[in-house]
Amino acid sequence: MADRGKPRIGVLALQGDVREHLYALEAAGAVAIAVRRPAELDEVDALVIPGGESTTMYKLAIAFDLLEPLRKRLADGMPAYGSCAGMIMLADRVADGIEGQVTLGGLDVTVRRNAFGRQVDSFEADVEVRGVDGPPFHAVFIRAPWVEELGDAVEVLGRVETGPGAGRIVAVRQGSIMATSFHPEITGDGRVHALFVAMVRALTA
Ligand code: GLN
């Protein structure tokens, strides 16, 4: 009964930091469900695609017979949020992907994998995220992509403000799909997940 009225949000659980997203979604007022099978995908209102490694994740999506069901749900307007590798999975185009790498698509963007370069493999930076109230979001980037090119329908939600990647786009939204280059699930700051849960509530009301 306590779950009545809460959106049911899946976390794609093929690979990556699934548990942290499940926890952050529950904290933001959703019922969070790990999704590994098409039948589990059918049960959710929305989906989070975690960080990890997109070149592994897409192969597992094919192996688990999830590629086409995921594409179909996204095309039908299922709200989705991707962080890091999840952003890559949601991009229509990937720069520096591996031979044969495919994505689910939905975001009219080109993302560049491992864009910030080897020297800055992982870093932290404050990002002003549109829709997130209060101080800038302290964002953790781990071999992160950036958004290199974007279509007219894509709204920029945030950019890196300092360091070698200053000015680069790291948070976007297009209709029902949102993505960040960084990992909000590991910072203990629930505001990006709260933003997504609010978006899901608005879209599925
Ligand atoms: N570099 C990884 C990829 O291409 C993404 C890293 C991450 O998700 N932290 O998928």
Image (cartoon, rainbow, N blue to C red):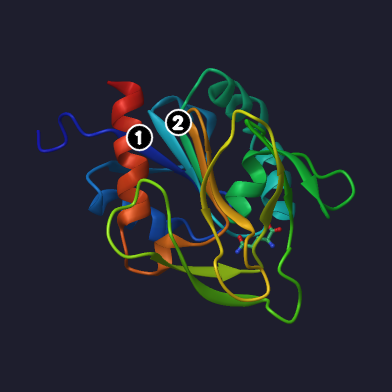
- Asked if residue 132 can be seen in this view, the reply is yes
Q: Please provide percent x and percent y for residue 48.
A: 47, 44
Give how far apart the Cα atoms at labels 2 and 1 are.
8 Å
Secondary structure of the residue carrying numbered label 1: helix
> Which residue is tagged 1?
199
Question: The C terminus appears in which quarter of the rendering?
Answer: top left
- Asked if residue 83 can be seen in this view, the reply is no
Secondary structure of the residue carrying numbered label 2: loop
Q: Is residue 146 left or right of residue 28?
A: right
Q: Please provide percent x and percent y for residue 157.
A: 49, 47
Q: Earlier in the sequence, mark 2 or mark 1?
A: 2
Front one among 81 and 65: 81
Disc 2 residue crowd, few under 14, some 14–19, many 20+, Cα 10 Å? many
Q: How many marks?
A: 2
The disc labelled 2 sits on which kind of residue?
A: Pro
Residue closest to the far right: 99
